[in-house]
Amino acid sequence: MTSLSYIYPNASFTGTVNKPTQLPVLNVSKLSVSKATISFTTDNATVEENLTINNGFISVKQTTLPVVTTTFGAGTPSLKAGSTDVAGQVTVTGGTPAAGNTITVTYHTVYTTVPLSQPTVVFTAANESAAAAITTGLYCISSSTGFKFTFVAASGISPKFNYMTIGLE
């Protein structure tokens, strides 16, 4: 049972719902409730959900990907399909980083709310080249607009990293 209020074009509802399908007018098939946001999917309207928690698994969707660039002399930076400002995988295919080279991920949406204006970035190696870079020296600096990996020493070809950003309150 959930107490909620919603206002939708040509419909509004305030009350208690025992099952999502009991919501009037919209024939809601899926209902998500968070701090101040109610997201729902209906049979007659599409409402994009950006955050889903299902059986303890967190899923984040984003329409426009962040942008990735690098200072490597060669190599093509890319993000794995489905990557977001919150989590993803970055690769530089064919590139071999030298000391001082960087990989920069620029968020699609700037973190503007203090204290979230400088999120923490957690990253892991997704291949041997990235593991070697972490072993020989790699650090990450975050800002409200993105984050940057800086190589302290030369590393192997085509490093690949998984990342997750966390805004701390």
Image: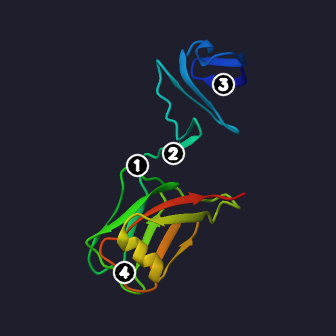
Residue 6 bears which disc, if any?
3
- Give the mark, 1 or 3, whose residue is nearer the N terminus: 3
How many labels, in total? 4
Residue at the spot 55% in from the left edge and 41% down from the top edge: 57
Crowd tier of the residue under label 3, counting other residues whose Cα lies within 10 Å: few below 14, some 14–19, many 20 or above: few
Under circle 3, the secondary element is: strand
How far apart are the alpha carbons under marks 1 and 4? 27 Å
Residue 142 sits in quarter: bottom right
Crowd tier of the residue under label 1, counting other residues whose Cα lies within 10 Å: few below 14, some 14–19, many 20 or above: some
- Give the mark, 1 or 2, whose residue is nearer the N terminus: 2
Question: In this orientation, which residue lies closer to the viewer: 12 or 103?
Answer: 103
Percent across and percent down for residue 165 are 56, 59
- Considering the image in quadrants, where does the C terminus appear? bottom right
Q: Amino acid at mark 2?
A: Val
Can you identify the residue that label 4 sits on?
A: 155
Question: In this orientation, which residue lies closer to the viewer: 101 or 24?
Answer: 101
How far apart are the alpha carbons under marks 3 and 2? 23 Å
Residue 38 sits in quarter: top right
Can you identify the residue that label 1 sits on?
A: 82
Can you identify the residue that label 2 sits on?
A: 60
Q: Amino acid at mark 1?
A: Gly
Q: Amino acid at mark 4?
A: Ser
Crowd tier of the residue under label 4, counting other residues whose Cα lies within 10 Å: few below 14, some 14–19, many 20 or above: many
- Give the mark, 1 or 4, whose residue is nearer the N terminus: 1
Q: In the image, 159: left or right of 135?
A: left
- Residue 167 vs 52, above or below: the answer is below
Marks 1, 3: nearer the viewer = 1
